[in-house]
């Protein structure tokens, strides 16, 4: 897919220096992959504490079953 993007040249230059990538296509793909990964991580963090366990739940006993 061909898409025209207007991106800050200072950001592109910094990305080139940090990644060593020389093509804009690779830089955009790397950035999108990192962005998507970060969003997925944030969604997982939102689940923290969402599961309520019974007071009598013994996780140590569950580990020893296997």
Image (cartoon, rainbow, N blue to C red):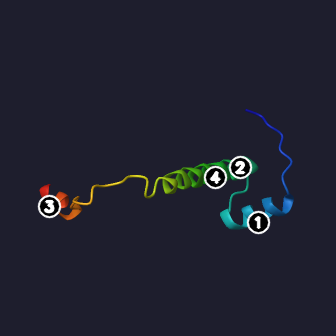
Q: Horizontal and vertical percent for residue 24?
A: 75, 50
Q: Horizontal and vertical percent for residue 35?
A: 63, 52
Q: How far, Cα to Cα, is label 3 from label 1?
A: 50 Å
Please name the residue that numbered disc 2 is placed on: 28
Q: How far, Cα to Cα, is label 2 from label 1?
A: 13 Å
What count of labels does the image hold? 4
Mark 4 Cα-neighbour bin, 10 Å: few <14, some 14–19, many ≥20: few
Q: Secondary structure at mark 4?
A: helix
Please name the residue that numbered disc 4 is placed on: 35
Please name the residue that numbered disc 3 is placed on: 64
Among the two numbered marks 2 and 4 on one chain, the one whose residue lies closer to the N terminus: 2
Quarter that holds the N terminus: top right
Q: How far, Cα to Cα, is label 1 from label 4?
A: 17 Å
Q: Horizontal and vertical percent for residue 8?
A: 85, 57
Q: Nearer the viewer, mark 3 or mark 1?
A: 3
Q: Secondary structure at mark 2?
A: helix
Q: Nearer the viewer, mark 3 or mark 2?
A: 3
Mark 3 Cα-neighbour bin, 10 Å: few <14, some 14–19, many ≥20: few
Q: Nearer the viewer, mark 3 or mark 4?
A: 3
Q: How far, Cα to Cα, is label 2 from label 4?
A: 10 Å
Residue depicted at 14% across the width and 61% down the height: 64
Q: Are marks 2 and 1 in contact (CB under 8 Å)?
A: no
Among the two numbered marks 2 and 1 on one chain, the one whose residue lies closer to the N terminus: 1
Please name the residue that numbered disc 1 is placed on: 14
Q: Secondary structure at mark 3?
A: helix
Residue lying farthest to the front in this orientation: 55
């Amino acid at each position: 897919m061909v898409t025209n993007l207007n991106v800050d040249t200072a950001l592109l230059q910094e990305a080139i220096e940090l990644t060593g990538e020389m093509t804009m296509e690779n830089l955009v793909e790397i950035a999108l992959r990192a962005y998507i990964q970060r969003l997925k991580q944030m969604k997982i963090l939102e689940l923290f504490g969402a599961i309520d366990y019974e007071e009598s739940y013994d996780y140590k006993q569950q580990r020893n079953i296997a």
